[in-house]
Image (cartoon, grey):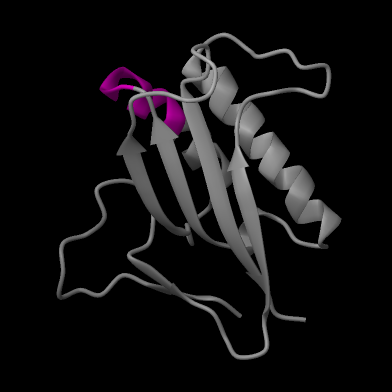
């Protein structure tokens, strides 16, 4: 079982994430590559919220292929192309996690491989079988 660590001795998280997540011995690990908002037909939705939801949908597909789900995510790293994209990304993130959110980092970057992308998300998951 994953243990979410947010000690009382440091500032509470700024948003819905844990300061740390402890993975028990002998857990299977899954490292998800950064996911951009590309559907199987190569379409890209408009807007950061829709893009972030599709990124998380893609991560969900990778998780399911390994017999995992969002509760198994230990850490997410997310990248947006401007401060205006932070809030929509965070809405999509918060829709996926309950009271035990993963550790998380959010960074602003100058861009991605195609100009229309505004967000990319990568994840690490652990499953105790």
- Residue 57 located left or right of residue 21: right
Query: Can residue 121 be seen here?
Result: yes
- Residue 80 located left or right of residue 61: left
Q: Is residue 42 magenta?
A: no
Residue visible at 22% across and 59% down in the picture:
12
Residue visible at 44% across and 41% down in the picture:
78
Residue visible at 66% across and 14% down in the picture:
44
Instruction: Quadrant for the N terminus, please.
Output: bottom right
Q: x, y percentage for residue 20?
A: 38, 70
Magenta-drawn segment: 82-89
Q: Quadrant of residue 68?
A: bottom right
- Residue 129 located left or right of residue 6: right
Q: In this view of the protein, which residue sits in the foreground, 78 or 10?
A: 78
Compared with 47, 10 (above or below) is below
Picture mark count: 0
Compared with 64, 23 (above or below) is below
Compared with 125, 127 (above or below) is below
Q: Residue furthest bottom?
A: 25
Q: Residue furthest top?
A: 46
Query: Can residue 16 be seen here?
Result: no
Instruction: Quadrant for the C terminus, please.
Output: bottom right
Q: x, y percentage for residue 74?
A: 53, 64
Q: x, y percentage for residue 39?
A: 75, 22
Q: x, y percentage for residue 82?
A: 31, 22
């Amino acid at each position: 079982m994953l243990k979410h660590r947010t000690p009382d001795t440091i500032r509470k998280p700024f948003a819905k994430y844990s300061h740390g997540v402890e993975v028990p011995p002998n857990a299977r690990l899954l490292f998800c590559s950064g996911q951009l908002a590309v559907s199987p037909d190569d379409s890209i939705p408009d807007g950061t919220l829709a893009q972030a939801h599709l990124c998380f949908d893609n991560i969900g597909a990778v998780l399911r292929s390994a017999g995992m789900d969002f509760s198994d995510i230990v850490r997410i790293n997310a990248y947006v192309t401007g401060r205006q994209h932070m809030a929509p990304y965070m809405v999509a993130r918060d829709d996926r996690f309950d009271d035990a959110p993963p550790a998380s980092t959010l960074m602003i970057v100058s861009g991605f491989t195609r100009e229309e992308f505004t967000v990319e998300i990568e994840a690490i998951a652990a499953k105790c079988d």
